[in-house]
Image (spheres, grey):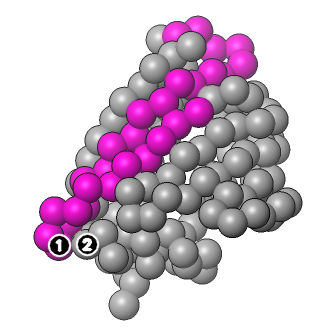
Amino acid sequence: MVFVQDEGVFDASIEKVWKYLDSPQDHQHSSIPRTEVLEQKGNTVKIRQTVVTPQGKEELVQQLTMDPPFGFHLETLEGSQKGSKNVHTYVPMGNKTKVIVAGDFHVKGLDEIATRKAILDYFAMVFDEDNRNMQRMK
């Protein structure tokens, strides 16, 4: 188990963050070239994603439970990160939104230090992509 917590502030209101999360055409990440919905029940969706990692491309199956306006829960069910669980919490701050991510991460083949670094590097990349993508939205 590797517990990781990270936080940042989006340059967008909580309403814009949720509009972004609900917009597949806007919510894009360079490390996730493909997402397929396998099953949806209420606010929970099971997805298969092709992800690009330093080791190459792989398939992950994840379960995503949306909990607006508070955030979402993500659990990896299959792939090199199987067993990883994390929570994204959104805190409204006027025209900005604080995001706090905390979770228990596992990456097959990586020790605790390498896992922590990989997760924090990934969070930094997707946070920057999210901020840029939200700024392009109308």
**Marked residue nearer the N-terminal end (1 or 2):** 2
Q: Position of residue 47 (x, y in %)?
A: 76, 55
Q: Nearer the viewer, residue 102 or 30?
A: 102
Q: In which quarter of the image is residue 95?
A: bottom left
Q: Contact (CB < 8 A) between labels 1 and 2?
A: yes
Give the side of residue 54 with respect to residue 117, left or right.
right
Q: Position of residue 86 (x, y in %)?
A: 52, 37
Q: Mark 2 points at which residue?
A: 13
Q: Mark 1 points at which residue?
A: 95
Q: Kindly state the secondary structure of the residue where label 2 is placed.
A: loop
Q: Position of residue 127 (x, y in %)?
A: 39, 53
| In magenta segment, residue 105 | yes
Q: Kindly state the secondary structure of the residue where label 1 is placed.
A: loop
Q: Is the magenta stretch mostly helix, strand or loop?
A: strand
Residue 70 lies, with reference to residue 116, above or below; the image says below
Query: Separation of disc 1 and disc 2 at Cα?
Result: 4 Å
Give the side of residue 118 with respect to residue 74, left or right.
left
Q: Position of residue 125 (x, y in %)?
A: 44, 48
Q: In which quarter of the image is residue 135?
A: bottom left
Q: In which quarter of the image is residue 9?
A: bottom left
Name the kind of residue labelled 1 in the image: Asn
Give the side of residue 57 with respect to residue 111, left or right.
right
Residue at image position (59%, 33%) is 85
| In magenta segment, residue 104 | yes
User: Magenta segment range?
Assistant: 85-112
**Number of numbered discs overlaid on the protein picture:** 2
Q: Hey, which residue is sitting farthest bottom in the picture?
A: 138
Residue at image position (73%, 29%) is 82
Residue 5 lies, with reference to residue 123, above or below; the image says above
Give the side of residue 118 with respect to residue 129, left or right.
right
Q: Determine if residue 114 is in view.
A: no
